[in-house]
């Protein structure tokens, strides 16, 4: 396993759509392991492949409580197959938009289909934080960031703050 560098906005790769995985092989399994290690080290609860510059439809997440045993999910070609009409608001953040958070409204429940690291297909239903995380990470695969749900003014303020933080870190 290896830690990967997480891309920060406004890296153009974060706004690109990812290609489907055509074959689940050792390279994909290694990618999933590296992504989990990177996500836990960040620390975060979800990471999509484009956030580390890999333009494939691959996501890892773990919304388990810190006190509980980790429950990592490794998702290949995840897709939302249904969503509730009921909406929920969660304060979202993103490893590619460090230290910035905003309330985002999304469907409260979703159904998702995905393949695991062995190429086996699964379907799950989710609500709460898991549903939000699923939608947030799948958005990454389509080149969508949580800031895209905000007003242009709020979005631009967040991007400017991140850029200022990055400049400060580089000069330190």
Image (tube, helix red, strand yellow):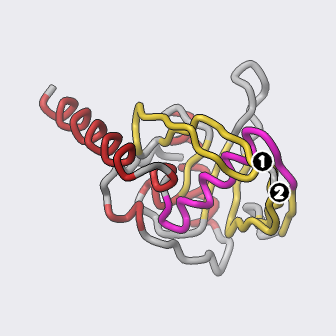
- Residue at 18% x, 30% y: name it: 168
Compare residues 87 and 124 and report the one nearer the observer: 87
* Secondary structure at numbered mark 2: loop
How dense is the environment of label 2, judged by Cα within 10 Å: few (below 14), some, or many (20 and up)?
few
Res 154 → quadrant: top left
Q: Position of residue 144 (x, y in %)?
A: 50, 61
Vertically, is 53 above or below 39? below
Residue 54 vs 62, above or below: the answer is: below
Q: Position of residue 63 (x, y in %)?
A: 71, 36
Q: Any mark on residue 108, and which? A: 1
Residue at point 64%, 37% (across, down): 90
Residue sitting at x 48%, y 65%: 143
Q: In this view, does 99 lie above or below 108?
A: above
**Residue toward you, 160 or 56:** 160
Q: In this view, does 7 lie to the left or right of 57?
A: left
Please tell me whether the stretch drawn in magenta is mainly helix, strand or loop.
helix
Per the model, the C-alpha gap separating discs 2 and 1 is 6 Å
> Residue at 43% of width from left, 48% of height from top?
4
Q: Is residue 135 magenta?
A: yes
Task: Look at the image and give the residue range highlighted in magenta.
Answer: 125-144
Q: In this view, does 80 lie to the left or right of 51?
A: right
Q: Where does the image place residue 17, in percent across and percent down from the top left?
A: 49, 72
Task: State the quadrant of the C terminus.
Answer: top left
Asked if the residues shown at circle 2 and circle 1 are in contact, with their CB atoms under 8 angstroms apart, the answer is yes
Work out which residue is located at the far left of the displayed protein and give it: 171
Q: Residue furthest top?
A: 67
Query: Which residue in the structure is indicated by mark 2?
Result: 84
Per the image, label 1 sits on a secondary structure element best described as loop
Residue 160: quadrant of the picture: top left
């Amino acid at each position: 396993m290896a830690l990967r560098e997480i891309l920060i906005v406004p890296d153009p790769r974060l706004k690109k759509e990812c290609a489907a995985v055509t074959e689940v092989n050792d390279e994909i399994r290694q990618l999933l392991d590296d992504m989990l290690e990177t996500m836990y080290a960040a620390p975060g609860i979800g990471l999509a492949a484009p956030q580390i510059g890999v333009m494939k439809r691959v996501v890892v997440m773990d919304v388990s409580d810190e006190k509980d045993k980790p429950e990592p999910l490794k998702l290949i070609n995840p897709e939302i197959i249904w969503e509730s009409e009921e909406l929920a608001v969660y304060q979202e953040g993103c490893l590619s938009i460090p230290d910035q958070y905003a309330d985002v409204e999304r469907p409260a429940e979703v159904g998702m289909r995905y393949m695991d690291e062995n190429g086996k297909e699964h379907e799950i239903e989710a609500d709460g934080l898991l549903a939000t995380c699923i939608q947030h990470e799948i958005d990454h695969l389509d080149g969508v960031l949580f800031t895209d749900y905000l007003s242009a003014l709020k979005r631009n303020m967040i991007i400017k703050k991140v850029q200022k933080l990055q400049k400060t870190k580089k000069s330190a």
